[in-house]
Image (cartoon, rainbow, N blue to C red):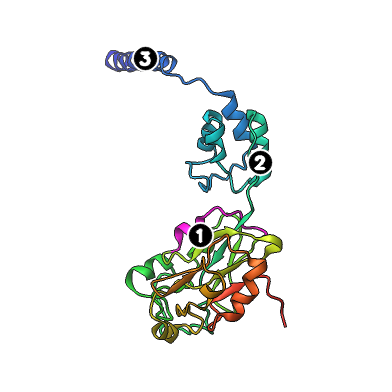
Amino acid sequence: MSVLLTGILVLGGIGLVAAIILHFVAQKFAVESNPRVQAVEKLLPGVNCGACGKAGCQDFARACASADIETFKGLYCSVGGNSVMQQIATLLGYKTPERDPTVAVLRCQGSCENAPSKFEFTGLKSCRLVARISTSQSECPYGCIRMGDCVRACKFGALHISPDTGLPVVDENKCVSCGACVAICPKKLFEIRPKGKDGKRVYVACRNQQKGAVARQNCKVACIGCMKCTKIVPSIKVQNNLSYIPTDVDAEKFGQELADTCPTSAIVYTGKKEQ
């Protein structure tokens, strides 16, 4: 019994000493909480998506609380949008300009019809895995793999796979431009672009850099780098056989003409009226 009692006393003493040491260490190195950080954090949506470029909402709140007026202008919570940023600016005594709303767009039209599958992948349904060992099922080296990694990555339910096309579809009413789809897509097919006035956007829905005839073998709506769009809007650039329409091109003014001029329908204009 004496040995057991001695052991208990020794272990208890060690625990007590350790507790005392930890108490004083905690007191010495304690970081006082910043009430400004806590106030900013309460205004944030709390989804910790990382779209702001910070490690979660708390880190973003710290950045806001410690920022000067110029640094603050570069901070933006895409989930909360302009309303949240205006509240934070008011709290901190700043003014911040409103930003145009943005949305994720898919730069690919390699649907089951436009780019028919040439083989069936029977392994794990993962775009990233397939991208490591093969091309897309249409054999377009730049096309959508159609296995839904982007859908699973979206925290806001803004993506789903269309049963008709096999492609992911963005619900712009739910999309908060968090960039999760941009980050996870191994083909880099998603892009965050301005929503545009009345939802009118114009962009090249293709990423294929192969020469025209080769690109069309795998997808009938591939960009062929014909440069017809550049004659309408000179700021449009064609590099590596692929056209790119800058986000500042006036979609309302040029969108319909650009879409009609494209010989392969690679250019998408969201304001196009159904015939």
Q: CA distance from mark 3 to mark 1?
A: 48 Å
Q: Amino acid at mark 1?
A: Cys
| Quadrant holding the N terminus | top left
Q: Secondary structure at mark 1?
A: helix
Instruction: Determine which residue is flagged by label 2.
Output: 84
**CA separation in Å, label 2 and label 1:** 23 Å
The amino acid beneath tag 2 is Val
Disc 2 to disc 3, C-alpha distance: 43 Å
Give the residue type at disc 3.
Answer: Ile
Magenta span contains residue 18:
no
Question: Which residue is the site of mark 3?
Answer: 21
Residue numbers of the magenta segment: 173-185
Which residue, given by chain and number where applicable, does mark 1 sit on? 181
- Residue found farthest to the left: 3
Q: Sequence order check: which comes first, mark 3 or mark 1?
A: 3
Few, some or many residues within 10 Å of mark 2 (<14, 14–19, 20+):
some
Label located before the other in sequence (2 or 1): 2
